[in-house]
Image (tube, rainbow, N blue to C red):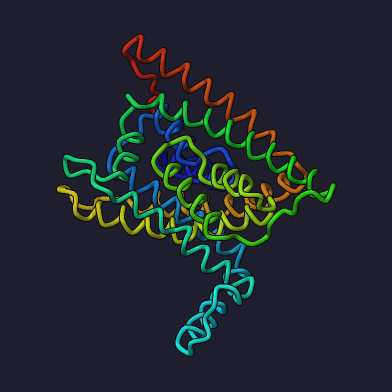
Amino acid sequence: MIDYILAALQGVVQGLTEFLPVSSSGHLNIFQHFTGISGEGNLFFNVMLHLGTLVAVCAFYYKLIFRLIKAFGSLVKKIFTGKFSFKKLTKDENLLVMLVIGLLPLFLLFVPIGNDMKVKDLADILTGDSSFFIVTGISLLLTSVLLFAGSRINRKNEELEKMGKTKLKTDYKVLDALTVGLTQCVAAILPGLSRSGSTLAAGQSRSIKKQDAMDYTFVLAIPSILAAAALELLDAIKAPQGLSVDFGPVIVGMIFSAVVGYFSIALFKWLLKTDRTYIFVIYTALAGLAVVGVSIYEMVTKSTVCFTFA
């Protein structure tokens, strides 16, 4: 029973924090740190929770996804008939192309860094080893800084637009997409650095309207989550002990992450529209300071605080 309760709680944490700009990986790491949950099976479970939130984002953006599928067919037709032109792309076709470009920086995660490791493996190390818990706190503080900077830049651009001195963009260009893609790469490595928050801030820094920046970063998450899930499943199968998972708690966690994730998207869209994202700036700053404080205490006392469930 405890396993199911823990799975449900982690599903709620994942669903709430995947789309709110507070870092799902950071909060899962905090939860698992204080409950003593760790191991390869746990890394697999984390990815399954992400698949739950993938269901949420697909359900929320199903109309846009269908439009992008239609745009894909249109692009294929234009390419094979020799009518393809970057300057004549429709809004949906441009979005689809920019999503592909935004995913290109993810290949940097597969750059070797020695000892049979790739850049992406740093995420498993920083998440799975409690000695790196302080990284989560520092990354949460960085999330707060990025959210604050993105909000300030967006507010300044909106004021300039009202004065007729600039015009905010609704469509992404190549440099915009690459900027967001590179930001997503860094967020994929650091637990505590919010993917949605940092990529939203990156979009705002490129003078993209905040709602369009949010839609782009959430839809960009779909192929990113699928790729991460496929890689984690492959790693789990190749592990010496094989894939040994109790799928009951996994399914429970996925259901909770999907349902809660759907409503957290709606909540974030409303908070962004009403300029209330400062809440997350304050929260991630306080959470980051708390985690850094706990980490320093643990390093000094050489002990890890862990609650045991029996």
Q: Is 60 left, or right, of 295 in this rendering?
A: right
Q: Position of residue 278 (x, y in %)?
A: 69, 34
In what quadrant of the picture does the N terminus appear?
top left
Quick one: which residue is furthest to the top in this view?
A: 301
The relative height of residue 20 versus residue 94 in the rendered view (above or below) is: above
Left or right, 27 with respect to 227, comes to right
Quadrant housing the C terminus: top left
Name the residue nearer the viewer: 47 or 90. 90
Residue at the extreme bottom of the image, as rendered:
81
Hey, which quadrant is residue 28 in on the image?
A: top left
Picture quadrant of residue 122: top left
- Residue at 43% across, 56% down: 225
Residue 206 versus residue 70: which sits nearer the camera?
Answer: 206
Q: Residue at x 19, y 49 (%)?
A: 239
Residue extending farthest front? 165
Is 166 in front, or is 183? 166
| Above or below 180: residue 90 | below
- Residue 67 in the image: state x and y as whole percent: 60, 74
Apparent side of residue 166 relative to residue 289 in the rendered image (left or right): right
Q: In this view, does 220 lie above or below 306?
A: below
* Residue 91 pos. (x, y %): 64, 71
Q: Which residue is drawn at 58% across and 41% down?
A: 21
**Where residue 157 sits: x, y (%)?**
73, 45
For the image shown, how many numbered marks are present on the structure? 0
Nearer to me, 213 or 267: 213
